[in-house]
Amino acid sequence: MGGSNAVDPQGGPKRRTRRNVNQNLGCVYCWATDAETGQPCTSRSAEGSNLPYCERHRREGDGAIQVLDHPENHAVGKIVVANIDLPKGYKFVYWGKRCRWRGCKGEDRAMSFRPNGGVIDPTGCEGQQVQFMACPGPSERSNIKCTDVCFGKTYDTSLVGREIETSEPVKKNHQLLQWYGSKEWFESRGIPRTNVGTEAHPAPQRKKKLKSATEGGRKRKAKGQLKPEVGTSGQEHVKPEEDVMLQLTPKGLLVASDLLEVGGRPLEYSIHRLDRERRFAVSQAFPDLGSAEEVLAVPTFQCALGVDLNPEAGSPETLVQEEMNRLHMNIVMLESEVYSQLTARGFFCDSVDPLTGCSMHSRSGSRYSEVYSAHKLLGYQILEANGIRMIPLVVHPQFGTSGYPVTIFSTAPPDILHEVLQAATTQAAPSVGSGSNLRTDELR
């Protein structure tokens, strides 16, 4: 499909469509599709708005998609379905009000904005359809991805947004699915992760990996071996052969911290060099990271207090959710300080947001599995929750299944990285060994 031009009756720049997608090019004209014609909207984007939508489509939504109630499973809630055949690369904007995470009303649907710019809260925004996209189930895959394009300034008081686009063609009446970020989203709410596709509104299926006869023999000989599988969405999935994996020896360990405290929660971190497998996974997750640069991984673990993050433990759902929010806020504050210090010195620094599954600062790539990373780098055991495949838990040797893992990556040398991490944690709170009221025997 070639791009096309159209004369603007009001004068000014001509309306042009994108080369391979039937959608207006640039931000002068509305990105939406007219529901009646199936063609790009001919109106300009609303004057003074950060968003590439006209007043009508910002109010009514993009005619290319519609929001429906799930026809079979009321627990899923609403879903988003294509009204027309959507090509790969069709763009939407995940928009809403910019706010701090702590004051976010719609935390379930919030999306990260610019670095230090808080989150995008779509609550109460009429016409914001993509906030209702469902999460793919265990045998399904996402067909939507975030980009690093944002609309609005870091501290903007107007409506802001972040660009998302289809990662593959989506047929008419098929669902648009967005990965919600991590297993913690479901666990904290006591919601089982289920397939969302129906006969009327199908969902893209994960491609099954063909198994050879020799592979089956290897599994019988080495039962308990961890085998990663990378789906079409790019996320690593852990396929344990038993409920609990065998413990391994930490790899590439350079620095191991003492037990610290951040935001009233115990925290520990370690610094590791990456082997070829982990380095490739990191380069896929962060496309802006140069392939020739050495990058260090800093897996961090916080310990939830008063609750167990394992859904089988029976901790009250509301308390688990509150604790998960607290842990997320703690790591965002710590990571932001580390990011500011290291990037000011010219080093790369980034991590994956546990809520969105997208990079916190740079351009997003494929998904990075915190669970598999903890097993490979630290040798921590893996436990399946409720026997459901693809939703494993890390078993921390001291925190158990109350550990909250987030990994920071940087090209800074280990001594500088350790120095910055120590300073960041010290500013947040004193260590457990120096005046804290926390006792290590009370962590579990």
Image (cartoon, rainbow, N blue to C red):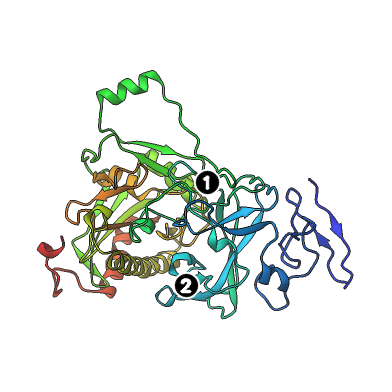
Asked which secondary structure carries label 1, the reply is loop
| Quarter of the rendering containing residue 250 | top left
Instruction: Tell me how far mark 2 sits from mark 1, CA to CA.
Output: 33 Å
Judge whether residue 408 can be spotted in this image: no
Name the disc covering residue 168, or none. none
Q: Is residue 23 left or right of residue 431?
A: right
The picture places residue 104, in percent across and down from the top left corner, at: 44, 74
Judge whether residue 341 can be spotted in this image: yes
Q: Residue at x 34, y 68 (%)?
A: 325
Label 1: few (<14), some (14–19) or many (≥20) C-alpha neighbours in 10 Å: many
The picture places residue 190, in percent across and down from the top left corner, at: 33, 58
Name which residue type carries label 2.
Answer: Gly
Mark 1 = which residue? 197
Mark nearer the N terminus (2 vs 1)? 2
Name which residue type carries label 1.
Answer: Gly
| Mark 2 vs mark 1: in front | 1
Q: Is residue 355 left or right of residue 258?
A: right
Asked which secondary structure carries label 2, the reply is loop
Mark 2 = which residue? 118
| Quarter of the rendering containing residue 48 | bottom right
